[in-house]
Image: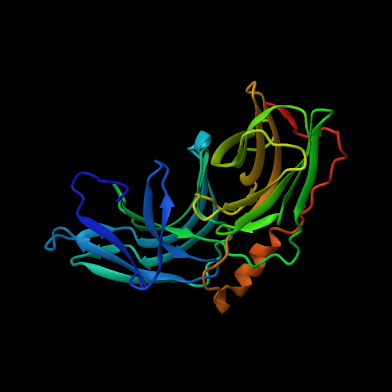
Amino acid sequence: MSFFGFGQSAELELVLSDAESRRRVEHKTEEGKKEKYFLFYDGETVSGRVVLTLKHPNKRLEHQGIKVEFIGQIELYYDRGNHHEFVSLVKDLARPGEFTQSQTFDFEFTHVEKPYESYTGQNVKLRYFLRATVSRRLNDVVKEMDIVVHTLSTYPELNSSIKMEVGIEDCLHIEFEYNKSKYHLKDVIVGKIYFLLVRIKIKHMEIDIIKRETTGTGPNVYHENDTIAKYEIMDGAPVRGESIPIRLFLAGYELTPTMRDINKKFSVRYYLNLVLIDEEERRYFKQQEVVLWRKGDIVRKSMSHQAAIASQRFEGTSSHAEAKTPGQPAENNGRQ
């Protein structure tokens, strides 16, 4: 209950109609904890009942109306006073009057549009929730229930490999290749690293998965980089002509789908960062963006429309990086 006023005389409870059969998933809260919530997809109906329980059955409860809302909103942590709602549906359950006993009200929001995935990040939160309200003169009685929304996609038809040649003139020249540019969240990144020229003493090599969260617009843009994973490729000095295979399983990491310009408020992008460290602790790196998407365990027929919409969001993503000529430093290639 959002408000606990003095002399609160009623309690509210929200119960989903399919609570026993609906799947629940873990989702990170703003405090960093994991809790389980009911899972929904775009286009699914949200229905249930609001249970109003009077604490003192012999006393009357006067009110100015009862309603239930389904809300999707984005909250930017640096602007907590403003909640940006992109979904707002309201059902009036009772007109102004009074109650002398407990009541139950049924509600249904049919084929609700839920265009974005639930997300809790460093500087932003996207949440969906139900809110039941008994309006009163002094203090409203309010109850909220959060749900989690996942956006599904289908296999992209065009999924080119990523192949690049990067180097530092007369010092280092390597070629790396990843099998795809788009991966679902339980996919495996398969690739190879080829050493064409090695004139610096490399002692360590790894691939990092970096999540970059971007919030705000214009001059008030905030970038937050978070290293999700570090995968060691090599420990020791490579030689010319050596080839090192890569197999990186994504299922063990906390990843979300790539999110681009969500409601013009924030974006979440993922990068594979190839890092080399020499014996003098100098770091050489190269970043490459990859697209992550969510694949449904069982894609139901009712999800086909939603999946088509989700798939369209990835159109226009560059799927093949330009190769660099030997000896030419690639963009973003250098020492950290």
x and y percent of residue 168 in the render?
80, 30
Quadrant of the image occupied by residue 223: top right
> Is 186 placed left or right of 177 in the picture?
left
Q: Position of residue 261 (x, y in %)?
A: 66, 48
Left or right, 223 with respect to 179, comes to left
Q: How is the image coloured?
A: rainbow
Residue situated in front as seen by the camera: 52 or 292: 292
* Residue at the limit of the structure toward the left, as seen here: 58
Image vertical order of residue 256 relative to residue 300, above or below? above
* Residue nearer the viewer, 53 or 166: 166
- Say whether residue 3 is left or right of residue 322: left
Give the residue displayed 59% in from the left and 59% down from the top.
187
Report the label total: 0
Residue lying farthest to the right in this orientation: 325
Picture coordinates of residue 63, whole percent (x, y): 29, 58
In the rendered view of the protein, which quadrant contains the C terminus? top right
Q: Residue furthest bottom?
A: 301
- Front position in the image: 107 or 277: 277
Q: Which one is in front, 244 or 9? A: 244
**Is 260 above or below relative to 113?**
above
Q: Residue at x 69, y 46 (%)?
A: 289
Identify which residue is drawn at 64% across, 63% down. Answer: 310
Where's residue 12, x and y in %? 27, 59
Q: Quadrant of residue 186?
A: bottom right
Q: Is residue 318 above or below residue 158?
A: above
In the drawing, does residue 122 fall left or right of residue 189?
Answer: left
